[in-house]
Image (cartoon, rainbow, N blue to C red):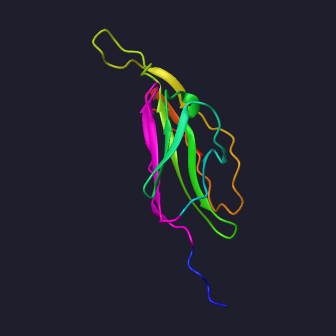
């Protein structure tokens, strides 16, 4: 038997996005022509909620997240599949809230204890996934040292 080439292929992967609370974030993934069965996931679960929309232009698929909150932080995945094959691309969204670091009257940052700006979250792995990525952000002054 001759192996058939994959029906779907990612032409342009998702890119990581960093935005502020209240902003709009748009993920884009370009696939080979003819792809029709697609799905968007957040932290390996089917995307739900009302503050997003999906659309297609040409061979590119888009996920637009509106009025971002810190709850939108996570790993977003685009999946194109049929009954035999699937391809996926994943990337992170980092939503930052306003800078809450204490400052002096002159505007310089004052010493303050470490604070988690983005915390670790539970995640499920998709079957066949070969890696997992965890991300956290810690701020403090002096700059904290994080050990794994």
Residue 131, quarter of picture: bottom right
Question: Looking at the picture, how far across and down is residue 33, in whole percent?
Answer: 47, 65
Does 47 sit above or below residue 4? above
* Relative image position of residue 123 (x, y in whole percent): 68, 45
**Total marks placed:** 0
- Give me the residue at 54% from left, 35% from top: 52
Residue at 43% from the left image edge and 38% from the top image edge: 18
**Of residues 147 and 67, which is closer to you in this image?**
67
Comparing 64 with 55, the one in front is: 55
The outermost residue toward the bottom is 1
Q: Is residue 120 above or below residue 124?
A: above
Question: Eyeballing the image, is 90 above or below 111?
Answer: below
Toward the left, the furthest residue is 106
In depth, the one of 101 and 128 nearer the eye is 128
Magenta stretch? Answer: 7-34
Residue, x 42% and y 56% (percent of image)? 58
Say if residue 144 shows up in the picture. no
Residue 119 image point, x, y percent? 59, 34
- Residue 79 makes an appearance in the image: yes
Q: Considering the image in quadrants, where does the N terminus appear?
A: bottom right
Q: Position of residue 35 (x, y in %)?
A: 54, 62
In the image, residue 15 lies in the stretch drawn in magenta: yes
Determine if the magenta segment contains residue 99: no
The residue shown at (59%, 56%) is 79
């Amino acid at each position: 038997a001759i192996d058939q080439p994959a029906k779907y292929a990612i032409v342009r992967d998702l890119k990581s996005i960093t935005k502020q609370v209240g902003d709009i974030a748009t993920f884009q993934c370009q696939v080979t022509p003819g792809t029709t069965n697609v799905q968007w996931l957040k932290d390996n679960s089917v995307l739900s909620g009302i503050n997003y929309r999906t659309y297609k232009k040409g061979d590119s698929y888009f996920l637009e997240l509106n009025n971002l909150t810190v709850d939108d932080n996570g790993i977003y995945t685009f999946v194109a599949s049929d009954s035999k094959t699937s391809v996926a691309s994943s990337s992170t969204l980092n939503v930052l809230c306003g800078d809450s670091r204490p400052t002096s009257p002159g505007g310089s940052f004052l010493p303050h204890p470490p604070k988690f700006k983005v915390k670790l979250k539970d995640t499920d792995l998709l079957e066949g996934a070969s890696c997992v990525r965890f991300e956290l952000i810690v701020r403090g002054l002096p700059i904290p040292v994080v050990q794994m």
